[in-house]
Amino acid sequence: MWRNGGDRYGLISIGFHWTLALAFVGLFGLGVWMVGLSYYDPWYNASLALHKAIGIVALALALAKFGWRFADPKPALATDLKPHERAGATAMHWLLNALIVLVPATGYVVSTSEGAGIDMFGLFEVPAVLGTSEGLRDLAIDLHYYLAYGGIALAAGHAGMALKHHFVDRGSTLKRMLNPCRRSKRRD
C-alpha cells in the first residue's frame, strides 16, 4: 500500500503527485496574482516571500519524488492505453517531471541573483549560491515565466486526458492515482 506494486501506485507516490500538483497550480495562481500587485500594495512583499518559500519546498519535494522513484519504480502504464496514448503519456510525464524542477529552480535563480537568500517562513534562510549576474537573472526571469505557463498548460492537458480516459474510455488510469488499495481491472 505504501509502495508501488504491480499495476498501482502506492500512497507515497500518490502523495508526491497530488502535493506537487497542488503546489504547482497554487504557485502559478499566486504568481499571476502577485505580479498584478503594485510594489506598494500591502500584500506585495508577503505574497512574494510566500511564493519563494513554497517554491523552495516544491523543489525539495520534486527532488524527493525523484529519489523515491529511484527507490520504488513506478508501475507500467495502464494496459488499456492505445500505443499513441502510451507515447503521449510517456512524453507528458517526462515534460511535467522536468518542469516541476525547472520552474522552481529558475525561480531560485531569480530570487537569489542579487546575492540575498530566500527566507523560509522565518525559520531559516536558503542561501544564494550563484554569483550575481544581470544576464543570468534576465534569462531566469524569462524561463521562469514561460516554463510556468507551459507547465500549467501541460498540467491541464494531463488532467484532461486522465478525465477522458476515466469518463469516456472507462479506463483505469485515474483510479490508479486515486486509490492505492484498489487493483485496476485490466482490459487486454
Image (cartoon, grey):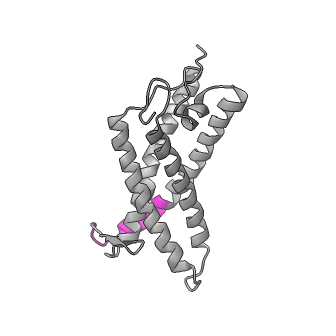
Q: Is residue 135 magenta?
A: yes
Residue lying at the far right of the rendered structure: 168
Residue appearing at x 57%, y 79% in the figure: 43
Residue appearing at x 39%, y 64% in the figure: 108
Total number of numbered discs in the rendering: 0
Given residues 80 and 142, the one toward you in this image is 80
Q: Is residue 162 above or below residue 135?
A: above
Image-based side of 169 in relation to 60, left or right: right
Q: Is residue 134 visible?
A: no
Expressed as whole percent of the image width and height from the top left, the position of residue 78 reads: 54, 24
Residue 161 appears in which quarter of the rendering? top right
Expressed as whole percent of the image width and height from the top left, the position of residue 58 reads: 44, 56
Residue lying at the far top of the rendered structure: 188
Residue lying at the far bottom of the rendered structure: 40
Expressed as whole percent of the image width and height from the top left, the position of residue 97 reads: 45, 44
Q: Is residue 116 magenta?
A: no
Boundaries of the magenta span? 130-144
Q: Is residue 136 visible?
A: yes
The image quadrant where one finds the C terminus is top right
Question: Magenta stretch: dominant SS?
Answer: helix
Residue appearing at x 60%, y 20% in the figure: 185
Q: Is residue 42 above or below residue 2?
A: below
Image-based side of 90 in relation to 73, left or right: right
Q: Is residue 114 above or below residue 175?
A: below
Expressed as whole percent of the image width and height from the top left, the position of residue 40 reads: 57, 86
Image-based side of 66 in relation to 77, left or right: left
